[in-house]
């Protein structure tokens, strides 16, 4: 199995990504690291513990990370998308599990150093924890097997501005550091994730067929689908942004990657744009197309 560290801002689609990873034998989750983004970092850490508990996997370590972007102040969170507490409409109670005392960035550095060239890092929130890790130890960029991020919109329009995708927008300076650090980086952006839609019928099926866990995930996800259907009339479901990053780790043939040079814009009207710079040495592989149906079938066969 591929050993991964999964960095999350849990969040509905983050929770679905955690479930997909935990339930896939091709992947071994060494730990979750958490960041601000969809909600505060405290809430992300708590929600991650809750989701692991629901999945019966409280043995997976969770490390809390950055509570703010590197150079900016974040005060507003998209609670209309992921719910008041980040878990949509799902009922929850305080988790029994404890967080590691180690900071997420230290956890990431330590794990990479103890298993050189073996780890895959999957980042599905703002890239702050990875930027902090590479600042502490620039050598880690050459010591990972692969980094897969959900973030950016290279050819597709953004979702917080015409150019910017939410994870990059939440900490553009961190993304800039990560894109220039020399990681073997795959970008799973809105170019592909807006094409992987989970329909409401599937969520109803969870509710009716899959007991308490099915109801928990259905209550969570229906809230997220309501947002998508209001924001994107006729879309027919919610985007599986973060789960697709896990899908790419399980089976790279779900997507087609194109090598290119991508630069993160850190100021001006195009703030947080992940811009293709033709003619420059490629620094990332950008997912440009996706076999949506095959991915969706695989995701739904695993997740609950
Ligand atoms: C990304 O932003 C967050 O709202 C989601 O969890 C996903 O990681 C999509 O732009
Ligand atoms: Ca996320």
Image (cartoon, rainbow, N blue to C red):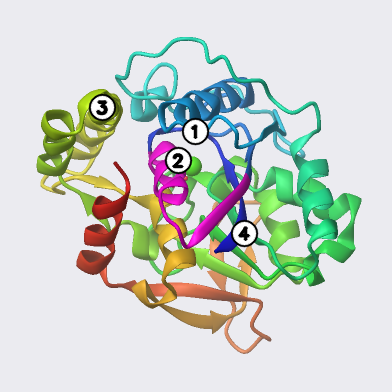
The residue tagged with tag 4: helix, strand or loop?
A: strand
State yes or no: discs 1 and 4 in contact (Cβ < 8 Å): no
Confirm or reject: label 2 Cβ below 8 Å from ligand 2: yes
Is 14 one of the magenta-colored residues? yes
Q: CA distance from mark 2 to mark 1?
A: 5 Å
- Residue holding disc 4: 3
Confirm or reject: label 1 Cβ below 8 Å from ligand 2: yes
- Residue holding disc 2: 14
Instruction: Kindly give the residue lying farthest to the bottom in the view shown.
Output: 279
Quadrant of the rendered structure where residue 100 is?
A: top right
Q: Position of residue 34 (x, y in %)?
A: 63, 35
Q: CA distance from mark 4 to mark 2?
A: 18 Å
The residue tagged with tag 2: helix, strand or loop?
A: helix
Q: Earlier in the sequence, mark 3 or mark 2?
A: 2
The residue tagged with tag 3: helix, strand or loop?
A: helix
Between 230 and 8, the one nearer to me in the picture: 8
Quadrant of the rendered structure where residue 144 is?
A: bottom right
Observer-side mark, 1 or 4, equals 4
Q: CA distance from mark 1 to mark 4?
A: 20 Å
Q: Position of residue 9 (x, y in %)?
A: 54, 35
On residue 223, which mark appears?
3
Q: Is residue 12 above or below residue 89?
A: below
Magenta residues span 13-30
- Residue holding disc 1: 10
State yes or no: discs 3 and 2 in contact (Cβ < 8 Å): no
Q: CA distance from mark 4 to mark 3?
A: 32 Å
Q: Earlier in the sequence, mark 4 or mark 3?
A: 4
| Left-right relation of 243 to 50 | left
């Amino acid at each position: 199995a591929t050993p991964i560290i999964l960095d999350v801002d849990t969040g509905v689609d983050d929770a679905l990504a955690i479930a997909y990873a935990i339930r896939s034998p091709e992947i071994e989750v060494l730990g979750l690291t958490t960041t601000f983004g969809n909600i505060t970092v405290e809430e992300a850490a708590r929600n991650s513990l809750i989701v692991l508990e629901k999945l019966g996997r409280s043995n997976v370590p969770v490390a809390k990370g950055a509570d703010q972007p590197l150079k900016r102040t974040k005060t507003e969170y998209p609670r209309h998308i992921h719910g008041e507490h980040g878990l949509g409409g799902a009922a929850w109670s305080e988790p029994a599990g404890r967080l590691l005392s180690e900071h997420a960035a230290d956890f990431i550095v330590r794990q990479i150093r103890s298993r050189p060239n073996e780890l895959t890092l999957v980042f599905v929130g703002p890239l702050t924890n990875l930027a902090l890790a590479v600042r502490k130890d620039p050598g880690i960029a050459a010591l990972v097997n692969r980094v897969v991020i959900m973030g950016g919109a290279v050819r597709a329009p953004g979702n917080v501005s015409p150019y910017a995708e939410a994870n990059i927008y939440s900490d553009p300076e961190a993304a800039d550091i990560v894109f220039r650090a020399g990681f073997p980086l795959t970008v799973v952006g809105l170019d592909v994730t807006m094409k992987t839609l989970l329909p409401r019928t599937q969520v109803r099926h969870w509710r009716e067929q899959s007991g308490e866990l099915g109801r928990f995930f259905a209550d969570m996800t229906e809230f997220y689908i309501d947002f998508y259907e209001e924001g994107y009339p006729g879309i027919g479901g919610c985007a599986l942004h973060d789960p697709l990053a896990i899908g790419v780790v399980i089976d790279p043939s779900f997507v087609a990657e194109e090598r290119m040079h991508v630069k993160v814009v850190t100021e001006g009207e195009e703030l947080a744009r992940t811009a293709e710079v033709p003619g420059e040495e490629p620094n990332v592989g950008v997912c440009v197309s996706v076999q949506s149906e095959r991915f969706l079938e695989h995701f739904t066969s695993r997740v609950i």
